[in-house]
Image (spheres, rainbow, N blue to C red):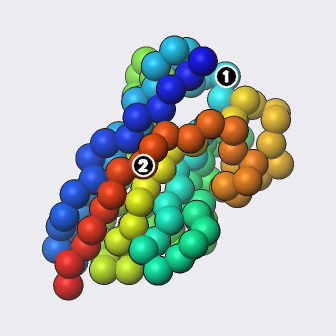
Amino acid sequence: QVQLVESGGGLVQAGDSLSLTCAASGDSLSHYAMGWFRRKASEKEREGISCLSTSGYEYSDSMKGRFTMSIGDANDVVFLQMNNLKPEDTGVYYCAIVPEGDYNNCLRPYDMDLWGTGTTVTVSS
């Protein structure tokens, strides 16, 4: 079974950039849709940031412009580049996957099947 491990979180200042990595083991990601999500410190629910499927990259409207998702050449790692970070971006960031065709909206947390444990991002003002 696929396991996902996020890394790259940390403490940064407002305006800084950060790159997160999600490494998959156990299988290639080529048969999955994959997404980045976060649970902000002030929220109980996770929210979708971006996802990659056979339809291409999708972004939540509020994340467009500052966040960029990409995938490694070997299809076993995905990245999230975050620029111009703001204090309200503070939270735990997760990657998640779901088999292609087995979801309705890969930006919706409830449609995802397997999650990593998350990496914490803290943005100070």
Is residue 71 visible in the rendered image? The answer is no
Is residue 23 visible in the rendered image? The answer is yes
**Residue under circle 1?**
31
Occupied quadrant, residue 76: top left
**Residue 79 horizontal/vertical position (percent):** 39, 42
Disc 1 to disc 2, how far (Cα)? 22 Å
Q: Is residue 27 above or below residue 116?
A: above
Q: Nearer the viewer, residue 81 or 114?
A: 114
Q: Nearer the viewer, residue 35 or 117?
A: 117
State which tag comes first along the sequence, 1 or 2.
1
- Which quadrant: the N terminus? top right
Q: Are marks 1 and 2 in contact (CB under 8 Å)?
A: no
Q: Is residue 59 above or below residue 63?
A: above
Left of 91 or right of it: where is 36?
right
What's under tag 1, amino acid-wise? His
- For mark 1, does the 10 Å Cα neighbourhood hold few (<14), some (14 to 19), or many (20 or more) residues? some
- Which quadrant: the C terminus? bottom left
- Label 1 secondary element: helix
Q: Residue at x 38, y 80 (%)?
A: 88
Nearer to us: label 1 or label 2: 2
Badge number at residue 84: none
Badge number at residue 118: 2
Q: Residue at x 57, y 72 (%)?
A: 44
**Residue 95 horizontal/vertical position (percent):** 50, 44
- Label 2 secondary element: loop
Q: Is residue 39 above or below residue 125?
A: above
What's under tag 2, amino acid-wise? Gly
